Image (cartoon, rainbow, N blue to C red):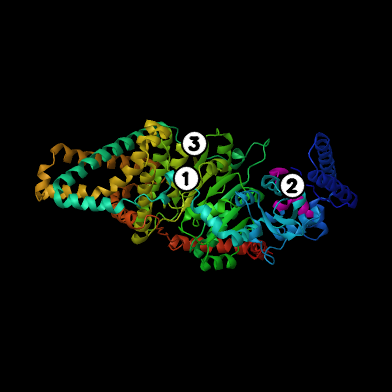
Amino acid sequence: MFVARRGDAGDFLAVVGRSLRVVRRMDKSEPDADAAGDRQNAEQVLNAVASAAVAARQRLGSLMVEMGLLDAAQLDSALSAQRESAARLGLIVAHTGLASAGAVAGAAARQAGLQRADLRASPLDASLLQGENALAVCLAHRIAPWRRSGNAVVYVAADEAEARRGLATLGVAPDAAILALAPAQEIAEAMLAAHGPAIAQAAATRAPAATSVRTGLFARWRWPLLGALALAASLAPAALLISAITGLFAINALNAAVRIAVLRAALIAPRDPEPATPADAVSLPARLPPPRVTLLIPLLDEPETAPVLFDALERLDWPRELLDVKLILEEGDLRTRAALEATPPPPFCTVITAPAGAPRTKPRALNVALDFAEGEIIGVYDAEDLPEPDQIRRVARILRNAPPEVACVQCRLAYYNARENWLTRCFAIEYAMWFDVLLRGFRALSLPIPLGGTSVFFRRAALEQVGGWDAHNVTEDAELGMRLARAGFRCEISASCTFEEASSQTGQWLRQRSRWLKGFMATWLAHMRRPAALWRDLGARGFIGFQALFLGAAAAYLGLPAFWAFWIMGMFGAAPAWFAEAPGWLVWGLATTQIAGWCAMIAAALIATHRRGERWLWKWIPSLTLYWPLGAAAAWLAVVELFVSPTLWRKTPHGLGRGAEALRARAASRRAEQGPAAARAAGQRISGS
């Protein structure tokens, strides 16, 4: 479908108007072969006229110089950047802080002969958005019906060409739409204000119901199950306990076998398939334009993290015009919003406010922001993250060179405050094991990989194909990894590292770990609703790996108190009567598999810390035997919450430790060195000027 574009020359407008009147008359007449031919000829005229009108437009760069937005040197710099990135000039100017997004939109509107819409002064008319999938189409093409003008509807858009495609998808008649331009940020704000409840509902139900926690898990049978267990415990406690020990032994045996196999595979597999290399060696092929990358960064009650986060984003080695950073706030989070106003983000950042709705979780916020993302690669960072500067370059190279079935890239994670106390040291050892040994073993064995919640990058098409994140799953990252695997995708691992802040207080650690384990249990229950389908999707090896990853991880922690109880009772001869009824092979088998699993993890810890050059942690590795019981406490807390509040998100506070204080001071010093000009450019994103 063709929609005429309007240039600056009156002659072109006159011809376009006459051609449109011809097309309208044809629309009202009876269809016949001659009319169809006349219509085709008229549309060809319109296409030719529109092309000529576009050619006649004043170039945007010279127009911005004429308007006083740029000087000649700034224009030359922007054009030089455009030759490297192939991005639109207006995007370069706005994202590098040369001019505000609003000023660029005004220049683009003047160039096209269109109105510059002021959505903050004149909000959207929500009643104009009608029709099935109309909201999804408008979000995808960054357009919105604004208001009526006679018999036509004025649509506001961020990009004229993209708007034309969106109107064609909506089936809007050529003479029924008038275009106006506005910055993408203003359109996002206006859409959230006018259609917030619908966007919130779509975000909450985006993931497929078949594997989503929102369908209940225990909604119908959690309390009957608990009652049945209580009844069995009262009538036949010995039989119930022996059955539980037998099941625990079987799961532990599987878990230990998989851990040993994964450890062996990690040792045999190449250590770094994507090794660290100089920046010029990871540059993208010159024959193809580099991709635009959207970074989704949820922020909830984290005002302390803003200075460090913005400093880390500024240091990323990626063209600013190809960075689309979405800072996601929750409605009502006034503290974080005030922090963003006091410490404005870089000009390539925009703020998305997730509308009120349930559940109030990180994955729901990610789903909301995904609708407004503009990149072909979608990355996720946490508020306290410090990624290595060349991380996006490495990820982009991996995805460009990888086959289509590689849907995502997981970067390594480490802690910058590992030396703070015993808890952070053990946490650092655990992360080293997971990201430097175990994940590589999973990949080498072609097992499904449970993704981390940060520093993971997706091909947007694959992410949208599987339904984004499950808003009701509190370990949304690991669950998404399983859905990708079931859809035939796989994950690659990058050598690039992101540094985070480890929980340094026991209470914080327990709340965070209980959330992780609750999510693992919920993921296992959701995907095991149809075990046969899971087997078909993952294959035998993937199915076994899934059991070890999710059921095994939870059972290893849940069974730890029983293991220690048996050990102590055996030492002091204080075993209860039912213990004597348990077969000796079962008790010894449970002890053997538990110890075998521990030995595998200790070996993985030694290898991982050696590979990271952190052998100073070796003396702390034996203390993991005291660290793991904390995981048991978190696991039993997770079981209780799984019954009572399966979607409760226990937020982990960040930016509170000594290391975070030093980072904030360093970031403030860097920003002060950049001077007030950088702060003013950043502030345009908050003020909307």
**Residue 190 appears at what percent x and percent y?**
63, 61
- Foreground mark, 2 or 1? 1
Which quadrant: the N terminus?
A: top right
Q: Is residue 90 magenta?
A: yes
Question: What's the residue type where badge 3 is placed?
Answer: Phe
Q: Answer whether residue 8 is magenta in the image.
A: no
Q: Which residue is mark 2?
A: 80
Regarding mark 1 in the picture, which secondary structure is present there?
loop
Q: Nearer the viewer, residue 122 or 147?
A: 147
The residues tagged by marks 3 and 2 sit, at their Cα atoms, a distance apart of 38 Å
Residue 176 in view here:
yes
Of all residues, the one furthest to the right in this rendering is 11
- Label 3 vs 2, first from the N-terminus: 2
- Return the mark for residue 489: 3
Q: Percent x, y for residue 45?
A: 85, 41
Is residue 446 in view? no
Please give the label number shown on residue 208: 1
Q: Report the quarter where the C terminus lies.
A: bottom right
Residue at mark 3 to residue at mark 1: CA–CA distance: 16 Å
Tell me whether circle 2 and circle 1 mark residues in contact (CB < 8 Å): no
Q: Earlier in the sequence, mark 2 or mark 1?
A: 2
Q: Amino acid at mark 1?
A: Pro
Which residue sits at x=63%, y=60%?
Answer: 126
What x and y, as percent, mark residue 328?
A: 54, 58
Q: Secondary structure at mark 2?
A: helix
The front one of 439 and 233 is: 233
| Whether residue 672 is situated above or below residue 624 in the rendered picture | below
Distance CA(mark 2)–CA(mark 1) = 45 Å
Dominant secondary structure, magenta? helix
Q: Residues within 10 Å of mark 1 (few under 14, many from 20)?
A: some
Residues drawn in magenta: 72-92
